[in-house]
Image (cartoon, coloured by chain):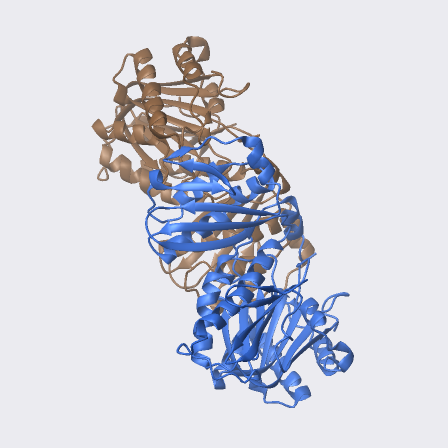
Chain colours: A blue, B brown
């Protein structure tokens, strides 16, 4: 694929990911948590990287999240990330915590670095102890050169995902090429305020910690927190960003003239990963994008977008290519936002379906044809203000039920 | 079925409904909104009845709800209810309002009563105008004796429901038999704060309006507002209660010695109807009942119950007879209630599955066998206080997707 250049000179590289930025390597192996597929992966930076994270709001935070947050807090740096799939190490009590610390310690030992520079994370089934013998055997082998491969890493973090999620961008800052790369997993249990999703972003930018954290939080609110698959928020979600400074730009802060460019590039990475996760929702056949305009505030815009994208009735109607705009309008009505019914416009793709409190005349067959596409857009104009939000999700299908009725067995 | 007597002397009559109380009749016909099934029904009281209603919180309230609320407000009385199914008269603008008023006026004319004593309501597809010619023709015939039949009424209010929902109870108050009867419809779009559900309760009790309304609101919060099928809240929901006083008891108020008995009987009716709606959720194969105990407040107890009962992942796991307690725990964790993870106990039926922050040992096959039953109970002990709540819902199945992917077409 040819790199695409935007007006702000963000070069988008669809085939690249976490190893595009200078000084990062990644890899993955099969250690035996899953039957056959890769289940243990790593990202390592040549030097300690400034690191920021966002974590699930679920009260039952899984053990590795507790370990990782505590470790990052020591000096806001991470040099390596170790991820296993197939077992979430969640609801595993004291032993789960000990296991997460052991993962961290063993990998730090293999790398010859301080333990607190290793972030650990897990995804998969809840409530089972990690098979530490298999995991430790895997950790001992994983750094061997034959397993070093970004593709292996991207595979090793998946659970019910049907495809890898990756993206990278490059921007020029102080005449230096700064790269930002990302990889993610997530397919079910995806909902605003994080999901069973893991996101990893690497960059060789030189950046101040506080500003990196701020950017991550703002971007997460507009991207990863705006996707939903089924409304469940998981115990294990996190997004970690590592910035190792090897691009040698002048330190990025909010006052740097190219700050906005960096943030835009960072957002391109997160939005792309978020959309890929939404599109790969369990059993999904379509990506749904809801754009809300004219809200009286950001939160209101997001609330309306999330209500629509989370509606099982909207999701099934789109699966069935049924232009059932009434369900969209109904979702707006229960979003909790005091909208003005007669001021609202709703469009499904190019077709205006609701205006002045009434359905607009449509040729049903035309809208049905539009709903056959792989990406469906819903536009809502609230006419109450100037705020906007975009939310992404997917249709609800037979396969969603099939996958989730028998995940463990 | 033999009437069952509880310790408080509430006689439960499963085969009776809105016409058990003295002075009420009901009926229904096919007027042509639907292809074949009955689609227009009524309840009429011999005398004007004290009436109270609760209505959807959706901002897009359908036209008949506006008309009915306005009419009841005039003297807190209703003598007749007219319901059509197949068309919700929602999102139909000015014309929809005119149509709802016309329904009301035409039926009042047939009955020879004041217009504001007729409550009207509609359920079905959103955004299409009512076929007033068919409806008016139906209204002209519906009072003929051959259509007077409570069974007809209960059929005429259904949409995707697979069965009628009815119940009645009798209690003794001041030596008089007071009857309370109910009928309801609802199958999809069912969620706390009302649903695409209609509930009608009749009683021959003599009762003060303010107390009736208070009882209705409190009971609705514990029953109809605690059921969920798919998390969507509809534009058309309402529960109406009519009390015509023909039992000739001394007027019931909160100070009447038998007030609690009356409220208990009223609640039996509403809870029974609510559970029947949850069990008949679109595509459902099982009723799920979540009991939350030990919460620090009623709202907290309800929030935890609703989070669990609304989780698509819990619902699909139960459909698949998968004892995936991790999804229950995760739902508790994102309920918004600050629970204490290590204090919580979770049981699936008789099987304790989670305690002290850890899974409890279970024999997986035994729990799977339990999950084959038609009613599944989930018990949660939060150990934070003395408040409780119960929520009801259903499993999420292939058929839910099938029904909703093609409702209109």
Q: Position of residue A95 (x, y in %)?
A: 60, 76
Residue B229, relative to residue A180: is it above or below? above
Q: Position of residue A33 (x, y in %)?
A: 72, 69
Quadrant where the C terminus of chain B sits is: top right
Residue at 56% x, 53% y: name it: A229
Asked whether the viewer can see residue B349, the reply is no
Q: Nearer the viewer, residue A2 or A158?
A: A2
Q: Position of residue B175 (x, y in %)?
A: 29, 27
Residue B243, relative to residue A282: is it above or below? above
Residue B90 image-quadrant placement = top left
Residue B180 image-quadrant placement = top left
Residue at 55% x, 58% y: name it: A190
The answer to whether residue B31 is left or right of residue A48 is: left
Q: Nearer the viewer, residue B125 or B286?
A: B125
Q: Position of residue B280 (x, y in %)?
A: 54, 36
Asked whether the viewer can see residue B338, the reply is yes
Count of picture labels: 0
Q: Nearer the viewer, residue A323 or B147?
A: A323
Residue at 39% x, 20% y: name it: B42
């Amino acid at each position: 694929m040819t790199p695409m250049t935007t007006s702000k000179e963000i070069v988008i590289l669809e085939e690249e990911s976490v190893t595009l930025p200078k000084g990062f390597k990644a890899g993955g192996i099969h250690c035996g948590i899953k039957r056959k597929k890769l289940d243990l992966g790593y990202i390592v930076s040549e030097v300690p990287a400034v690191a920021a994270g966002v974590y699930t709001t679920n009260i039952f935070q899984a053990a590795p999240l507790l370990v990782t947050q505590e470790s990052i807090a020591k000096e806001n740096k991470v040099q390596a990330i170790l991820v296993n799939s197939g077992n979430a190490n969640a609801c595993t009590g004291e032993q789960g915590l000990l296991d997460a610390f052991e993962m961290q310690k063993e990998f730090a030992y293999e790398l010859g670095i301080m333990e607190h520079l290793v972030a650990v994370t897990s995804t998969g089934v809840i409530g089972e102890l990690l098979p530490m013998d298999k995991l430790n055997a895997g950790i001992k082998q994983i750094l061997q050169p034959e397993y070093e491969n970004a593709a292996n890493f991207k595979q090793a973090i998946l659970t019910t995902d049907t495809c890898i999620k990756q993206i990278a961008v490059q921007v020029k800052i102080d005449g230096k090429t700064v790269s930002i790369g990302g990889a993610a997993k997530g397919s079910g249990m995806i909902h605003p305020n994080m999901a069973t999703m893991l996101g990893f972003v690497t960059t060789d930018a030189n950046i101040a910690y506080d500003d990196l954290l701020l950017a991550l939080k703002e971007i997460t609110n507009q991207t990863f927190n705006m996707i939903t698959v089924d409304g469940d928020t998981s115990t294990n979600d996190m997004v970690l960003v590592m910035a190792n400074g090897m691009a040698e730009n002048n330190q990025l802060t909010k006052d740097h003239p190219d700050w906005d460019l960096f943030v835009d590039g960072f957002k391109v990475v997160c939005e792309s990963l978020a959309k890929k996760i939404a599109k790969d929702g369990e059993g999904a056949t379509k990506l749904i994008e809801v754009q809300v305009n004219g809200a009286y505030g950001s939160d209101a815009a997001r609330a309306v977008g999330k209500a629509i994208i989370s509606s099982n009735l909207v999701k099934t109607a789109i699966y069935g290519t049924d232009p059932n705009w009434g369900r969209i309008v109904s979702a707006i009505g229960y979003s909790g936002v005091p909208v003005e019914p007669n001021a609202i416009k709703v469009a499904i793709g190019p077709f205006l379906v609701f205006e002045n409190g009434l359905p607009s005349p449509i040729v049903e067959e035309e809208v049905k044809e539009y709903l056959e596409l792989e990406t469906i857009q819903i536009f809502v104009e609230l006419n109450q203000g100037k705020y906007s939000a975009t939310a992404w999700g997917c249709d609800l299908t037979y396969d969603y039920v099939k996958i989730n009725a028998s995940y463990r067995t």
